[in-house]
Image (cartoon, grey):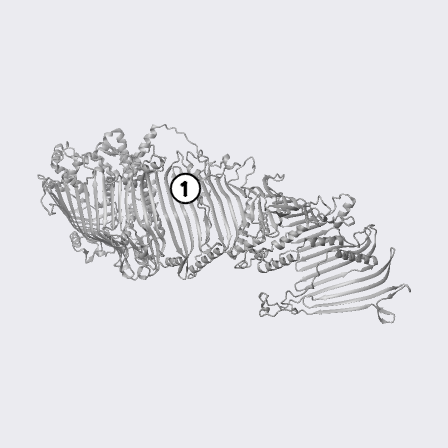
Amino acid sequence: MFEGVVASLLNKYLGKYIQDLDAENLNVGIFGGNVELFDLRLKPEALAELDLPIEVKAGYIGKLTISITWTQLYTTPVIAAIEELYILAGPITERPYDADKEKRLIRAQKRSVLEKLEVLPPDDKDPSFLEKLATTVVNNLQVFIRNIHIRYEDTVSNKDHPLAFGLTLHNLSAETTNSKWKVTQLDSTATSIYKILKLEELTVYWVPQCLREQLLSRVTDLSRWKALMRQSLITHSLDGEKFDFVLKPLSAVAKVIINRSDDSNVPKLLVDFVLPDMSVSVGRKQFLSVVALAESLRRLEVSRQFLKFHPEVSLSGNAALWWHYAYNAVLHEYIRPYSWVRIKQHRARYREYKELYKKKLYAPKDTEVQIDLQRLEDQLDVPNILMAREQAKLEVSKSSPRRVRTVPKPTASWWAWESAAEDEEEPVDVFVPAEAETKALWSKLSAEEKQILCDAIGYKEEVHQDSKPVQYVQHKVNVTVANCTISLMNYGKDVLVLSWCNLLCSLERRPSSNAFRVSARTESFLVEGASIENDLVPVLTADNTVGAKGSRAPHVFSLDFEMKPLHVEADCAVSLLVEPVEVVYHEHAMSEVISFFQLPNLALADVKQTATEVASKAAKYTKAGLLHAIQTHKTVHFVVDIKSPYLVIPEYGTLQKGGSVLVVEFGRLRLDSHLRPKDASLEDATISEIEERLYDKLSLSLTDMQLLFADPGEDWHSAQLEPESEMHIVPSLTLQLNVFNSIRQDYSAMPKQKLFVTIPVLKLNISDEKLLLLMDFVNNVPLPSISGYEDLDPDEEVDSGAPTVYEPSILLKKNADMKYKLTTKQLAAIRQSVHRNSALRSQRDDTDSGRATIAGEPDELYFSESDHSEDEEELTSSASSIFDESISASNTVQRLFRFVLGELVVRVSRAVAHVERPYLMLRIDKFCSDVALMTYGMALHASLGGVQLVDKINTGSSGEYLEMASSNSNSELISVVYRQVREDCPDLKALYHNTLRHVLVKFSSLNLVVDRTALLYLRRFIRGFKKKLWADRKELPMSPPSIPQPSNMFVPKNVRSGIVQLNALLHVSEVNIKLCDQMAEYAQFDVRGLEAGILMKKAKTSLRLSLAGLRVNDCAASSAYPHMLTTEENWVFDLKYVSYHSRDIVTRNRPIPVDYKLVLTAGRLKMVYLHRFTTDLISFFEPLLTTEDLTSVVVNAEHTAAKQVTEMSRYGTRVELNVNIHAPTILVPQSSGSSNLLLVKFGNLSIKNFIKETYILTSITRPIVDDIDIQLDSLEVARATLNATGGVETVHTILDPIILAVNMKHGLPPHHSQVLRWDISVQLDVIKVTLHHDDIKTVLGIQTENFMEDSAYKVTSPSPALRPSKKLKKDDIIQPSDIISKVIADATVEESEIHQVTSFKLALEGVDISLLENNGDLISLEPSKDFGQSLAQLVVDRFVISVVNSSDASYVVKCTLEGLSLLDIRPHESIFVRKIFSSCSNNMKVESDMINVTSPPMIDVTFKQSTEKDMVFDVVIERVRLNVSLPFMMAMVGFVKKAQLSPSLADSAAAAAALQSKNAPTGASLLQTYLSYSFEDGAGSLTVFINMKKSEVVLFANPTEQQTKILVLRTELMVDYSNRSAQENLVASVGGLEVLCCNYASRRPGYMVLEPCHIELTRCIFSESAGVEMNVSVSSVNLHVSSTSINIILGMLRCLQEYKGKSPQSPKASPISVFTNKEQNMWAVSDITHDRWLKNIPEEKPCTKPSFHQQASRKEVCNIKFKHLHAALEIENGNTHIPVLCCKALCEAVMNNWSRQLSIKLEMQLEASYYNEKLGMWEPFLEPCMEQEDNYRPYELCVKVLIEATW
């Protein structure tokens, strides 16, 4: 009946493995009932199903027995026995290449792969039939397998030391027993079947270094080979060498109970598998051998395709053969297969195979077709065979649907996510041949045989089995492992040992609901590592006694996983219970484990790359699994309870060495799920009810998490039980995590998934000492040392034969140029792609062939109108609007994440004498963050409730703790909202206004208290901590400063035109900063309404910054000006900055494109300047600043400015400016308590520019010029007073409003020679100044009182003045002139034609300064209304200065002053002289009442500098006149006296100024110190010409009389100075010096008092060593003195005496004393005290040693010569002058060496005569010297002076 079926099955399966199987004898034995086969040999391809490049070298089956009693088939057992199964396998490259063997191996592997991919049709039989059939077969079958030894030997992976590994089994049996588990006879009527399975001595061994003499592959005698295999099976050794066991001998018993009844309370199958002991041990050499074998097999798999070209000779001496091998391998495998001839041949074979396979589908038993198919399969690879078969099935399915059968795609399962990760596309239906159904057993039976089979197994087709209940357990398997040990060994010592006791595992299956349950439990788990003494120490301990805080638990680990659980409505349930686990870090144990697994010659980069690939693949699978579970709504019920696992990290790597201990306790983890019914109704439900009914909830809680740091000897075990102690760094912490999953994924109104994370309180306790101990702890904790195979001792013999591990290029990563076999999954994907492409092709055939093409956006630059429109979008929005408007009908929230931190408290303590004292406390209230993942983007909303920073050591002025930072508790401190939308969102324009990313940051209110003492204390604390931190470290970790890079968020991207890429806004409501000290408060700064925004588009990026309010208050109580800075308008400034990304943007208002646009509008500020307040601020911040910081800031700022100026000038940056500034109003009080003040209004500043093109006839290009207009108007200065209400009232206008206009034309690159680079023109209107003596008094009062006012606070600790640590050199500081010169030089380096580059012109229309005086109080005085009280007027005419710079670096500077006049405008009629000082040309114009436009200027200065640095100064001063009017001068002196301060105020101001200059350096000196350097002498020459034309000085006898006599002094001056090389020359001449006496009213010519004379001075310095020569020459001097000239002088003296008598009598001045105080006056009477001489001791100054070096000797000569001196005393007689006394003199003098040893020699000849009126002759007045009679000579005088140098 079944004989034929059994015979065909045995022939099919045994024929695959057994060589030369006698099928005829096998059939005879089967039909006879007894089959006995002896000495069977296995085929070399018997292991082809492993798909490895290995083969069977020798295979032997001693005896195969099958006993079947066909007459009593259902009552007697079927016995199958196999004895002595010996297999020896090895790599295929150990033998010479054999084409036939290789062909058979490849054919077997192809057949195995294709059979795996074959899809069998589902069985249509009733499951009960299959169940009864299987029960009957198992009941009747008894199996006995004895003496199995399977061995693999490899000499390829390591040629020097072959490896061998194998598996041995003594006995494996399956017998039927009774209920007592005793072997008994078969009872076919029994309802329960008992089977016992015995496994005896199962071992796995691995010999990494095997001697070649021990290789069984070298044994050629079959009988000896079988004897060795049999002996090694018994003795576990080979030739006396014991096996290295990986799995030590293992025996196990499995008891099986099969229930044949239909009772639902008893499982159909119950298996109890018991393992008493199991031990697995792996050595390092075994591990390296496994890696080497895997690498070798991978290499063999790659090189297998080249074996037919492989030369069978060694590499040495056969280089040509090996090069020929490489050539053939590349040519035949990588080049020729891709030739057109080979491609056509391959296509022909492919089509032929497809047609033959179609024939096979029609005629499955056609032998010729099968032979032809086999021939073609040998020439095609597996992917092509598979595709040809599937295409043939598709074609046959269309023509003959009966020949193939459609197998539907598999349904999704819980583990379907793995396939989804590999192939995201859904599986499709495949087709199987109809012949596949004939392969089933049921199809091979006849109808009679089918009926007999059904009767034998008790199956009746018409009787349907009752359905089982849901709780029915059909199959149950229990596995018990009493003791299990896994150990890693190295050098014969245990490195790591894992052991557990009583591991219980069970599997239950419930078929009614397609459910199962898996459980695992263990009583204890222990991991031990090797110590340095090679002892085992616990590393991980898990049992029911370790760290138990409660009762003893039965299991330390318990896991239950159930699909479709019964106790809850869910798809699966997970229950996990873990008792406390202690993990102890042991450095030596970890090092040994790392060294065990480290591979030699393994690059760390390859390991990282492999780990990254594995992690990304795992993340991909995890993500796919989560998405699959979410999409299919797989509900999981969790019950997880993990009790407080903790990690112990000792300081020195082991607890035995002592030291500190860091304990990380992970807390207790609880995981619970709350599931909702899937058919929940959401109609007529509120929002809260919808959230309650809609979501399944998974709740995870972590409690009692903590971090402890214990010093040596402290009991940290007790501290673990406390919520907080001194050892806690992080006290007890709780974390709550809730996961919500919607039961209705199609409900779009609510998120599909939500994740909430909550931490109620997070505390952190740190101190400086604890941080130092932690740093030492981190430095002392030894990391595991990585020492691999290369670190082993080469002298040890045991390592000499270590297995060679190749470079892991193939093991860790695949080479793209190599050909690899496709995996089964890849082949299955190919099969699915064939069917999928066929379906898509059929769909395309059904549709129209013509498709409309959609034109994409062009790649060329295009901007919409909105990209460059002048109307910018508003950068304001609210947080709620952004977050709420993010949700739309098409853009719904898919997932919502929320993180809430209730409170964060950071406590910082300072250790004093090892006692921690609380110092700082930082408290942050409620941080909340919501992240919503939407369909087309995401949204984020984060908020911070408040912040508080408290200093518990320093106190405030009230004595309480100092609160350094605080916020308003009524509102959120910070709120951040971010929204991102993709460009393909349907609502992008309508709802989101074409904005892809929107950011809004709100900052409500923050109060900062800057306490100087607290900041200094904090700085000392930080510096002390750093000093202690690096005390034992010689070098600091020098890392280069990180340069912040721009985020990708701010990089413009290529998006569609009109899209806003980013719209960000920052809003700061209020920030209050208070500067104080422990004793008092200094100032308070209030900033409010700060807004900043950025708008980024494709064409441009806009930046907006504005400030609404700014206030600075002086906290001093005595000040009358509490508000130092206030705003007079509702805003401070509004700045808008636009950066254009391209110069291709042209608009109507902007015909020429620009790079940047700047719009600034500033409101008017009201400022009060008190020098005391400024000094207090400087003294407040001075101790907080360091010299190094200031120096680095100055240098960096200069370099940055120079770089920016250079880049802008080089690249021609175009900036559009529109600046409107309401300049501030500055109040300068006379003192902090005075109501008098000076009011300075800076008016309004406007800056605008227009970029235009310049047309030049000689040039084709149009140069671009930036035309900038700057205007300052309404600049005004007045004297004002402070009224009772605090308002300011103007008393007197000092400076009338003026207007300043500046026009700058800047030529942008590329430059043109006819266009100036800079053309600057400055126009200033007439400056009109009106000064009253009270104004000057106020100014002097400001200087003496305000600027010298003492601080309102007593400085407790004066700080040293800031001075630079080193003197700055000239090269360290970049001056603006250097920057401009460098830019100009760079721009003109390639130009040859000399032309003008820059031009500057300043034109001042004039200055009018008037002095006023009065006798009473001045309330309101305007000069135009009351001219009677005027005193003097200074009028400066037009003043012009121009600077021209050429391309050859030459300069020309011209300065002209049209005129200067000083007028006496006192309202007295007796004053006839009004012009005190004026130019003669102006006088002529005024007197003649004519305008002469050609008159030269009063002063004309010209400066020229050539390319060679030659400088020339030319100064021309036209004729001027000075009228010396003593009444006017005395009036001016009186005016000055009225303006002076009182003596007491002057003395106090002088004392304050002296004290200030002594103690505190001024800002100017400070800046001078920083910028002090010495200039080097430059090349070139210097020439100065000064020409002052003939000018006049007029002396009046009596200015009040019109007919007064005057003396007129006239002279002209010329100076010529030159300095060339080493020679310096000076020539000065005073020519035409004369004095004239005349009448002022009549203007008639008078007489000469001093006749014209000349004075000439020459000075020449040849060199430093040659000397100096000076000559002074005076021409003839004729002096005429008369009574008129003397009366004029006496009249001036009388006038001076009269005005001196009229002046108010001042107190009698005390005689001037040289003594400064009483103590220094030795002659004053004073008391004697013991400390008298200790007072007023001057401060010690460093003693400087005087320099006594001898100067270089050089010649110094000065010659002075008076040619002739004639003085005459004359008597006036009418208009005649008669001389009466005459004196003549001749003088010569020589002065030498005045710088070293002064010597003077003076020789004079003198004679004097008087006129004897009686005799009518001249007689000597001074008797001459007589040499001889009638020989007289003048009186001679010789004077010699010699002064010796004392220095």
Per the image, the residue denoted by label 1 is 940
The residue sitting at 58% across, 70% down in the picture is 1730
The structure residue drawn at horizontal position 79% and vertical position 49%, both measured from the top left corner, is 1470
Whether residue 1731 sits left or right of residue 1614 in the image: it is: left
Residue 1611 placement (x, y as % from top left): 77, 55
The image shows residue 1153, relative to residue 1608, as above or below, that is: above
- State left or right for residue 375 relative to residue 661: left
Which type of secondary structure does the marked residue at label 1 adopt?
A: strand
Q: Residue at x 54, y 48 (%)?
A: 1112
- Compared to residue 972, the image places residue 920 above or below, namely below
- The amino acid marked with disc number 1 is Leu
Classify residue 1636 by image quadrant: bottom right
Q: Is residue 651 visible?
A: yes
Give the camera-side residue of 1142 and 1822: 1822
Residue 491 shown left or right of residue 1089 in the figure: left
In front of the other: 1267 or 978: 978
Is residue 788 among what the camera can see? no
Question: Residue 384 location in percent, x, y?
Answer: 29, 38
Where, quadrant-wise, is the N terminus in this rendering? top left
Above or below, 35 relative to 1816: above
